[in-house]
Image (spheres, grey):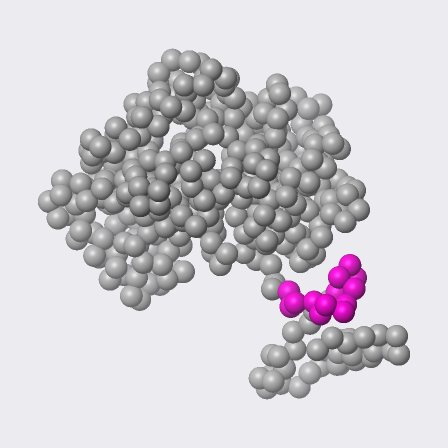
Amino acid sequence: MCFQRQIDALALPLSSVNRHMLAYVGGKAANLGEMIQAEGKTIPVPPGYVITANAYRKFVMGALKESNGQLKLLLDKLDEIAQNYHDDLLPEVRELGQKIRGLMENTSIPEDVCQAITEEYQKLFQETDSISANPSAVAVRSSATAEDLPSSSFAGQQDTFLNVIGLDSVLRHVQLCWASLYTDRAIVYRLKNKFDHQIIYLCVVIQKQIDPISSGIMFTADALSGHRYTTVIEAGYGLGEALVSGLINADQYKVDQKKGIITECIIGDQNLEIVPVYGKSEGLGGTKTIALSKERSKAQKLSKNQILQLAKLGMKVQNHYGVPQDMEWCFERGTHKLYVVQARPITTLFPVPLIPPTSDVNSLRVYVSIGHIQVMTDPIRPLGRSVFQHIFSLNENSKAVY
């Protein structure tokens, strides 16, 4: 498909988008499409499509018209608050967000947008195989055009809906996703990070729903220690919603990327699991929470082979993007097939200086920033002096890189 047609499209298969299309399909969709098209096409991503920024723009234009100017007044008021936002204005932000969501949730979806969503939905289920216990179940996921950036992730700011069944339900949840651009948390996040509300568009990813036996997150670098050669994996039973919502104590595994070995394994005591509601009828779907037996709650969630398989896949994704990744993954119930459902840059790592070509790239390095000493107005205390003496007491075998 030519680039201009992609820009004008209201919905696109994920297999036709890439990371350079963030402004048209949002961060989540751009990264999912990029992984599908990665060299060798060996990164497993559930099939799906994206409802584009162009579709959202048409929807908002319809909402502005249907609301007889009310929506514009609310958005303009939000822009005024953005000029000088502080936490005392939170009650006013909440009221504005509630009114904006109410108008958007009650706006009709334009006919051509409905048609585009319907056509891609039907194509998605033309295949006879299914990766879900509900053959027509999908996940409806928000994908903002300012999401999953190297400097700000927007993680969890807009809504996602799991195990949505039937076209009518999909259309309704797409609309709820669009409206979630104006939840309290999303508005405040944009205010604090100086993002203009009216130039951010919300795209929506529709993917076949995975029924996972286990799921979790993976960092291809240790964000706490800053170690670039340690993969950190957190895992739990069922859908990842329980883990990312902080409802469970997940397992944590660490893998030494160079040696390909597991260096740490902490078993979490998971007492509940969130799973899809099974059923094939229109209107069913959603999720439910079930209690786990004591034996299962204390068991290790992933096998050694699964942990190493995940770490290997994480490095493949990192090598493709060229930077450490924060990923979400799941193993399908029954088949135990591994899927990646999200990847984005880790935004909390301290930038590492380039290593000189003559250096040993495999050696461990400690980088110390001392620039702030130039603006210190108080004397350095004895402990501070001792630390600096140890840091700079280089012996004859030490090498300093400047």
Quarter holding residue 335: top right
Does 203 sit above or below residue 306? below
The total of numbered circles placed on residues is 0
Identify the residue shown where x is 36% and y is 25%: 121
Reply yes or no: does residue 275 show up in magenta.
Answer: no
Left or right of 40 in this view: 199: left
Quarter holding residue 253: top right
Reply yes or no: does residue 360 show up in magenta.
Answer: yes
Residue located farthest toward the right when viewing the structure as drawn: 396
Report x, y in % for residue 140: 40, 32
Range shown magenta: 352-365
Does 86 sit above or below residue 204? below
Which of 113 and 69 lies nearest the eye of the viewer?
113
The C terminus: image quadrant:
bottom right
Report x, y in % for residue 310: 66, 37
Identify the residue shown where x is 29% and y is 35%: 175
Overall secondary structure of the magenta section: loop
